[in-house]
C-alpha cells in the first residue's frame, strides 16, 4: 500500500470516528439539556393603571370577622392569559444555521489538515482560526467553561449550539488524538504559531530543556489555583488575568489588562509559544485529559537513541523515546519526520539493509 493510500485510509477512519463520537456527544448533551432546561412562560400581568385594592380595617384581637369587617372583594379582571410561544428546535436551528455551517466547515478543514499532515493546509487552518474563530466570532473554549463544568453552570444548550459543537469536538478529539484543539483550533494558539512563522528565527530565545521541563508545570499550578479560587468564591471573574482570549472581542480594556496583554505578546516574539507551553490553564486541563488519548503517535525502536525529533519539537513534548501527551499539541512536525525516508534513521536502516542483501544476493548465487 502506498503512503498516499495509507493516508487516505487513516483520514477516512479518523473522520468517521470523529463524526460518530461528535454525534454521540451531541445527542447526550441534547438529552441532558432538554431535561434540565425548560422555558418558563410569562405570567399574565395586571394593568399598570389599576388602582390598589383598598386595605381592610383592623380586626380586634379575639373577635370573629363580621360582614362589616370583611374587606371588599377585589375587582375581577377576566383578561385571557397571554403566553409567548416558546421557540421550537426548528426555530433555533434556523437562527443558528449559518454559525453551525461555518463552524462545521472550519472543523472539517482542521481535521483534514491534521490527518493529511499537510503544512500548507495547517497554515490555512491557523489563519482561518484567527480570522473566523477569533476576530469574527470570539468562539474559544475558556477556563470559564472549566469553571462551568465544575460548578454545573454551562451555557444554555439550545441558544448555543455552535459552542456545544466546538466543545464536543474538543473533548472527543482530545480523548482520541490528544490536544488537537491547542495545535489547530484555538484562535490564540494559532495566532502565536503564525507569529513564529513570520518572525525571523534569530529573534527566538532557545529555552534550555531543563528549564523548559520545570516551566511546563507552571500552567498546572495556575489551573489548580484558579479552580481553588473558583470553588471558594464561586466567582469566575479571575479569568481575564490568567488567559488572554478576551483580546479578540476587546470587551475588557482596563489599563492593567492591556499592559499584561502587551507584555505577553512582546514576550511571545522572543519565546516561542510562551503562553501555550507554560501558562495556559485550559491547555493544562486538556493536557490532563490527553492522558486518556487512544491513538498516540507511533514510535520506532530507533527512537530510543535518535534525537532528531526531540531537537525539532518546538513544544518540548519529546523526551528520548517518550512523547509527553500533556505537552504534545499534535503539530505534525515529528510525524512528518517519521515518514521522511531521507532523514528518519528507521527508514535509512531499512534501506541500508536492503542494499546489503541486494549486494550479497549475486555473490551467494555465484
Image (cartoon, helix red, strand yellow):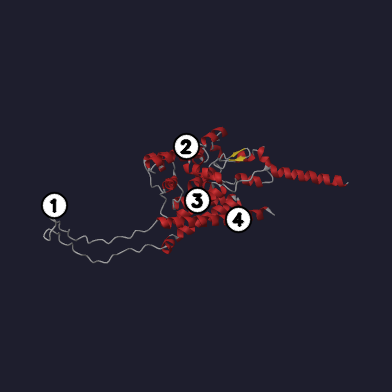
Q: Residue at x 83, y 46 (%)?
A: 361
Residue annotated with mark 3? 129
Residue annotated with mark 4? 13
From the viewer's perspective, tell me whether residue 274 is left or right of residue 301: left
Question: Where is residue 116 shown, x and y percent of the image?
Answer: 60, 52
**Local crowd at mark 1 within 10 Å, few (<14), some, or many (≥20)?**
few
Query: Mark 3 or mark 4: which comes first in sequence?
Result: 4
Q: Residue at x 68, y 41 (%)?
A: 301
Query: Mark 4 or mark 2: which comes first in sequence?
Result: 4
Q: CA distance from mark 4 to mark 2?
A: 37 Å
Query: Mark 2 or mark 1: which comes first in sequence?
Result: 1
Residue annotated with mark 1? 62
Q: CA distance from mark 3 to mark 1?
A: 77 Å
Helix, strand or loop at mark 4: helix
Helix, strand or loop at mark 2: helix
Tell me the mark number nearer the camera, choosing from 1 and 4: 1
Along the viewing direction, whichever of 68 and 357 lies nearer the viewer: 68
**Local crowd at mark 3 within 10 Å, few (<14), some, or many (≥20)?**
many
**Local crowd at mark 2 within 10 Å, few (<14), some, or many (≥20)?**
some
Q: CA distance from mark 3 to mark 4?
A: 24 Å
Query: Mark 1 or mark 4: which comes first in sequence?
Result: 4
Amino acid at each position: 500500500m502506498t503512503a498516499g493510500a495509507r493516508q487516505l485510509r487513516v483520514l477516512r477512519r479518523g473522520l468517521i470516528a470523529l463524526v460518530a463520537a461528535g454525534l454521540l456527544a451531541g445527542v447526550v448533551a441534547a438529552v441532558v439539556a432538554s431535561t434540565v432546561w425548560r422555558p418558563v412562560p410569562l405570567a399574565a400581568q395586571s394593568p399598570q393603571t389599576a388602582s390598589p385594592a383598598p386595605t381592610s380595617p383592623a380586626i380586634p384581637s379575639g373577635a370573629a370577622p363580621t360582614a362589616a369587617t370583611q374587606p371588599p372583594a377585589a375587582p375581577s379582571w377576566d383578561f385571557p392569559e397571554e403566553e409567548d410561544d416558546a421557540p421550537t428546535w426548528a426555530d433555533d436551528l434556523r437562527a443558528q444555521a449559518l454559525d453551525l455551517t461555518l463552524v462545521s466547515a472550519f472543523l472539517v478543514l482542521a481535521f483534514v489538515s491534521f490527518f493529511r499532515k499537510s503544512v500548507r493546509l495547517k497554515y490555512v487552518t491557523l489563519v482561518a482560526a484567527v480570522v473566523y474563530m477569533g476576530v469574527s466570532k470570539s468562539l474559544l473554549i475558556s477556563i470559564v467553561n472549566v469553571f462551568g463544568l465544575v460548578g454545573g453552570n454551562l451555557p444554555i444548550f439550545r441558544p448555543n449550539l455552535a459552542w456545544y459543537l466546538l466543545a464536543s469536538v474538543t473533548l472527543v478529539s482530545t480523548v482520541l488524538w490528544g490536544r488537537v484543539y491547542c495545535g489547530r483550533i484555538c484562535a490564540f494558539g494559532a495566532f502565536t504559531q503564525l507569529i513564529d512563522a513570520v518572525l525571523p528565527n534569530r529573534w527566538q530565545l532557545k529555552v534550555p530543556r531543563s528549564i523548559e521541563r520545570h516551566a511546563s508545570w507552571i500552567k498546572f499550578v495556575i489551573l489548580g489555583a484558579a479552580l481553588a479560587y473558583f470553588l471558594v468564591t464561586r466567582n469566575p471573574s479571575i479569568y481575564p488575568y490568567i488567559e488572554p482570549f478576551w483580546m479578540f472581542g476587546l470587551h475588557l480594556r482596563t489599563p492593567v489588562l492591556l499592559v499584561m496583554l502587551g507584555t505577553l505578546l512582546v514576550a511571545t516574539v522572543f519565546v516561542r509559544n510562551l503562553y501555550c507551553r507554560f501558562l495556559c490553564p485550559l491547555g493544562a486541563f486538556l493536557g490532563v485529559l490527553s492522558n486518556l488519548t487512544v491513538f498516540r503517535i507511533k514510535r520506532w525502536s530507533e527512537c530510543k537513541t535518535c534525537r532528531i525529533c526531540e531537537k525539532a519539537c518546538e513544544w518540548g513534548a519529546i523526551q528520548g523515546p517518550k512523547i509527553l501527551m500533556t505537552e504534545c499539541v499534535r503539530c505534525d512536525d515529528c510525524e512528518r519526520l517519521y515518514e521522511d525516508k531521507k532523514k528518519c534513521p528507521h527508514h535509512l536502516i531499512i534501506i541500508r539493509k536492503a542494499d546489503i542483501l541486494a549486494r550479497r544476493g549475486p555473490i551467494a548465487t555465484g
